[in-house]
Image (tube, coloured by chain):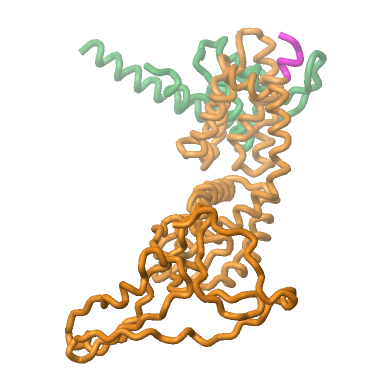
Amino acid sequence: MTTETVSTDVRDYLAAVMRELADLPPAERDDLLDDLDDHLHEVLAEGEGSLEQRLGPPAMYAAELRTSAGLASSTTGGKSTAGLLHRAIDAMSSSTIWRRTAEHPSTRATLDFLPQLRPAWWILRAWLAVEFIAAVQHPRYNYGFRDELGLIPRVAGVRYLAVLLLVIAVPISIAIGRRSHHGGARLLVLAGNVLAVAMIVPAVIALRSTTYVESQVAPQDGLFFNGHPITNIYPYDANGHPLDHVRLFDSDGQPLTPLPNMTVLDGASQGGVAFAPSAAAVTAFPDEQRNDFPKPNVVTVYSDNGAPTTAVLPRPSFTVAPLPSASASPTPTPSASPSSTP
Amino acid sequence: MDTTQLLKGVLDLAVLAVLDERDGYGYDVVRRLREAGLDDVGDASVYGTLRRLFQAGTLTSYVVPSEEGPHRKYYGLNAHGRDVMALSTKTWRGFADTMDQLITKGATA
């Protein structure tokens, strides 16, 4: 056994014991560990096995030291979760595979780089904390994550409150991150971090929720513009003159057809009289002219006895300014005709 | 019978007895306890006990430069330590006698 491996073993064991006693006041801990370095060297020098074989796991050594020295068992040692966690980490870090992986250059490089990401995590967890507050706030607003979360979440239904909370939470998170913690405070920070990580999933879902909502809209028949149904189209030429009998096709040669434009001026339905679209309204849209714009504005008026009367309303009166470049050519010819006619 | 459980109650006296014989440093005390027959004594227990006895004012401590290695912290009994040792010995003798009689009666009955 070389001197180097001896000192590595001693250093590892010493560090593990020290970690177990992290809750003690530094002076007390140093006093307790004063002789340990010599002790470990001496045990190894006897050449009767590794430190673990001779003295047991570091956690056990620390617990024994603590009890026999008459010190209260710690929150990090004994049966607590953190103690178990430490023991599990100790067991894991002593296995060969783990050690080889940990000592591989690429692992080293990655691990060396991770600390540089800590400030980013501090800011991220501050944001997650605000998302968490937004998620568990007043039940009146707590319909679900989707309504309240988002890049800037809503707190008590108000977004600027979240901005205010972020302004407070970010410096706090950074201050917590820059300081080292012991004992209970360390557990508290650990619990907070776990909570923040758990918050990532609902927060990310909330960020994507707009997309989900849009994709859930069922396709509808007819023509739509920005979600509103189009019942008629009024074409104008470049000079601002209204055009009649303009036929519209899509890129596949399919005629563009709105839903039948039937305004029903209902004088009788309040009396419970059933009505049907009049024949005139239907015949106003023969199949071959379905994409002929503008459509006639057919209005069916029901009299009190239920008899329908059909009328065609005049074209809505609005003026369209001519295009600035089109004043020279009053009748622009279409550059392309539809490739197929129905 | 698990001797580690028994040791817990008498380790103070055992350490005091070893140091009463002659001063020693931590691992030296461990070795001498084992040589005396207390095989199950734990290293950490001895170190912890030494520290507690020192804190209680029964031990003196001094550092001795060592030729082959690091400086060693030696412990020895002070006056108070000798008093405690005497008292503990008396307690132990009485306890051991009681246990002895109990066991002997049980065996002959």
State the residue at coordinates (73%, 34%): A112
A97 or A253, which is in the foreground? Answer: A253
B95 or A336, which is in the foreground? Answer: A336
Q: Quadrant of the N terminus of chain A?
A: top right
**Residue A44: percent from left, percent from top:** 66, 13
Quadrant of res A304: bottom left
Q: Quadrant of the C terminus of chain A?
A: bottom left
Q: Name chain A's colour.
A: orange
Residue B45 visible in this rendered orientation of the protein = no
Chain letter matching colour green: B
State the residue at coordinates (56%, 46%): A190
Callout count: 0
Would you say residue A288 sits in the magenta stretch?
Answer: no
Vertical position of residue A40 compared to residue A86: above or below? above
**Residue B4: percent from left, percent from top:** 45, 21
A94 or B4, which is in the foreground? Answer: A94
**Residue A180: percent from left, percent from top:** 67, 47
Horizontal side, residue A270 vs residue A31: left or right: left
Residue A318 visible in this rendered orientation of the protein = yes
Read off the magenta span: A1-7
A221 or A49, which is in the foreground? Answer: A221
**Residue A108: percent from left, percent from top:** 71, 28
Horizontal side, residue A205 vs residue A337: left or right: left
Would you say residue A5 sits in the magenta stretch?
Answer: yes
